[in-house]
Image (tube, helix red, strand yellow):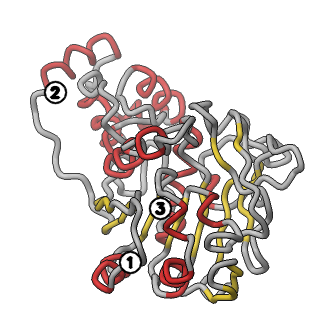
């Protein structure tokens, strides 16, 4: 599936992800609804077909019977002619761009570099095939815009938004409905060229800053505090113990499969000299505490020896369900 890199990113952060194939499905069954409502969070990836929200029975289930937090990543699914979370049907595609924070102090922007006007210093996405699909209209009344996309010409591009439980939405298929649980939108994962959406849609199109936004969004939805950058062992502090985690994994995980808990400072799926330099620059005190930890050239050799040791189990943060 094209969206597999998002699953990898979540699992690398210690989340337990259960994948569910929603392709060409009718309304969810009672047992499937129970499964979703037992999850901490349900994510509909960009590879999820908007046809799952096309008729009244399907829309009614997603809007009024799923009580767990639900985050959709395809704006096609939230149009007025689908679930009805936005005020219209336009869903423009976006080339690489920074986003603009409505509230720069929002937890979603923790650790993300912003300019004085709340605009990200760096782009949040990259160009894959048709680009990143974005909301082309504001959310319905009661919805909250978290970040806008300035690359959308008419100024109506919304990249991140939320709708509190009880928000009234208006779907062409199902009419006026009240949301049974909190709802979220995060523009991530590309739109495909052509018709093979399951294979080509939803690929990882987020930069390092975009991936940080995504993970911050997950933590925000779950009510968790954003992780402290450099705090690899999750104790809320950055100390020599965290540097030791980075140094043990340095050079031994270069296949793009690791996460922050392994020492990946820049979210590129690797633990390498870039992470070493960033940690040393940001946390000189913790670096100084790490007595006896070798400098980079030696670390590469040490990491090669230690790479044969299995890492301990990742910290679990509850079950997340990804719908595709």
10 Å neighbourhood of mark 2: few (<14), some, or many (≥20)?
A: some
Q: Which mark is residue 307?
A: 2
Mark 1–mark 3 distance (CA, rounded to whole Å): 14 Å
How far from the left and from the top, in percent, is residue 245? Answer: 28, 37
Say which residue appears at 26% left-offset and 30% top-offset: 249
The kind of secondary structure element at disc 1 is loop
Q: Kindly state the secondary structure of the residue where label 2 is placed.
A: loop
Residue indicated by mark 1: 28
Image position of 228 with respect to 59: above or below: above
* Label located before the other in sequence (2 or 3): 3
Which residue bears the numbered disc 3? 44
Where residue 158 appears, x then y in whole percent?
Answer: 74, 56
Horizontal and vertical percent for residue 278?
50, 28
Disc 2 to disc 1, how far (Cα)? 44 Å
Examine the rendered structure and indicate whether residue 255 appears above or below residue 299: below
* Secondary structure under the numbered disc 3 in the rendered image: strand
Q: Are marks 1 and 3 in contact (CB under 8 Å)?
A: no
Disc marking residue 270 = none
Front-most of 221 and 72? Answer: 72
Mark 3 crowd level (few <14, some 14–19, many ≥20, 10 Å Cα):
many
Task: Please name which of the two marks, 2 or 3, marks the residue nearer to the observer.
Answer: 3
Mark 1 or mark 3: whose residue is earlier in sequence: 1
The image quadrant of residue 178 is bottom right
In the image, which is nearer the foreground, mark 2 or mark 1? 1
Which residue is most to the right? 154
Residue occupying image coordinates x 59% and y 85%: 179
What residue lies at 49% left-to-right and 43% top-to-bottom?
201
């Amino acid at each position: 599936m094209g969206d597999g890199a998002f699953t990898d990113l979540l699992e690398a952060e210690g989340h337990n992800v259960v994948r569910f194939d929603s392709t060409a499905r009718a309304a969810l069954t009672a047992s499937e609804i129970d499964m979703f409502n037992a999850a901490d969070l349900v994510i509909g990836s960009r590879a999820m077909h908007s046809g799952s929200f096309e008729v009244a029975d399907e829309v009614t289930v997603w809007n009024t019977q799923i009580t767990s937090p639900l985050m959709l990543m395809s704006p096609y699914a939230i149009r007025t002619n689908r679930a009805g979370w936005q005020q219209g049907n336009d869903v423009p595609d976006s080339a690489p761009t920074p986003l603009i924070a409505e509230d720069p102090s929002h937890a979603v922007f923790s650790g993300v570099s912003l300019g004085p006007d709340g605009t990200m210093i760096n782009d949040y996405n990259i160009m894959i095939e048709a680009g990143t699909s974005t909301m082309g209209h504001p959310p319905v009344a009661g919805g909250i815009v978290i970040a806008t996309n300035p690359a959308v010409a008419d100024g109506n591009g919304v990249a991140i938004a939320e709708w509190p439980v009880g928000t009234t939405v208006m779907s062409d298929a199902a009419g006026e409905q009240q949301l049974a649980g909190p709802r979220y939108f995060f523009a991530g994962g590309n739109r495909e060229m052509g018709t093979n959406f399951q294979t080509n849609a939803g690929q990882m199109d987020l930069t390092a800053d975009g991936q940080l936004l995504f993970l911050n969004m997950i933590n925000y939805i779950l009510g968790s505090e954003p992780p402290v950058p450099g705090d690899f062992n999750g104790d809320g502090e950055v100390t020599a113990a965290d540097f030791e985690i980075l140094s043990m994994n340095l050079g031994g995980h270069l296949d793009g499969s690791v996460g922050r808990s392994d020492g990946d400072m820049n979210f590129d799926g690797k633990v390498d000299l870039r992470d070493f330099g960033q940690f040393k620059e940001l946390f000189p005190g913790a670096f100084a505490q790490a007595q006896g930890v070798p400098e980079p050239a030696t670390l590469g050799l040490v990491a090669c020896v230690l790479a044969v040791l299995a890492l301990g189990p990742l910290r679990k943060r509850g079950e997340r369900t990804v719908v595709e």
